[in-house]
Image: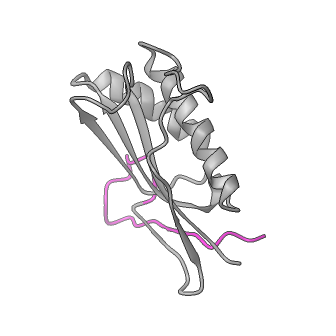
């Protein structure tokens, strides 16, 4: 099934960004708004305690499972927001690297934020996403 998502690039903005600056979907697309994907194991425990990369990977895994349940895949994502519980830029970059690698060439518009605390005990990373599909 072809993706409903068109990534928009422009040479009028910085070329150093590792993501598209915008994305569009046709009016006929069905939008999928995902809850924040947390680094939780199926039993509810937090995965990768103390490890930003491991938690980012688990959040991606859980996001992909939620997308699948909604009839979509990672190529249908329109945009992401990555929340990292840290004031250290290196920790944000670590989480971003995992997310960026998972998306590959489908480099959707993304926002990377350092926050003070996230909802679960030991949680360091959360990934929000919106997707779109054509039924």
Q: Nearer the viewer, residue 17 or 35?
A: 35
Which residue corresponds to the image point at 45% horizontal and 65% vertical from the top-left? 9
Residue 126 sits above or below residue 105 on the image: above
Whole-percent x, y for residue 49 in the image: 45, 14
Q: Nearer the viewer, residue 93 or 33?
A: 33
Specify the farthest residue to the right.
Answer: 1
Residue 37 sits above or below residue 22 on the image: above
Specify the farthest residue to the top.
Answer: 50
Q: Nearer the viewer, residue 8 or 16?
A: 8
Whole-percent x, y for residue 7 in the image: 52, 66
Magenta segment's dominant SS is: loop
Q: Is residue 104 visible from the viewing direction of this image?
A: no
Magenta highlight range: 1-20
Q: Is residue 133 visible from the viewing direction of this image?
A: yes
Q: Is residue 33 left or right of residue 101?
A: left
Q: Is residue 120 left or right of residue 89?
A: right
Residue 36 sits above or below residue 120 on the image: below
Residue 107 sits above or below residue 43 on the image: below
Residue 83, located in which quarter of the rendered image? top left
């Amino acid at each position: 099934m072809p993706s409903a998502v068109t990534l928009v690039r422009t040479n009028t903005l910085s070329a150093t960004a590792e993501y598209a600056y915008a994305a569009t979907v046709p009016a006929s697309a069905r939008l999928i708004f995902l809850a924040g994907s947390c680094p939780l194991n199926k039993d509810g425990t937090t995965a990768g305690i103390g490890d930003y990369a491991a938690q980012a990977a688990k959040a991606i895994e859980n996001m992909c499972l939620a997308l699948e349940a909604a009839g979509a895949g990672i190529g249908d994502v329109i945009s992401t927001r990555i929340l990292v519980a840290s004031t250290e830029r290196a920790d944000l970059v670590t989480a971003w690297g995992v997310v960026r690698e998972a998306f590959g060439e489908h480099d959707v518009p993304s926002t990377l934020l350092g926050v003070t605390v996230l909802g679960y005990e030991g949680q360091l990373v959360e990934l929000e996403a919106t997707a779109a599909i054509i039924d």
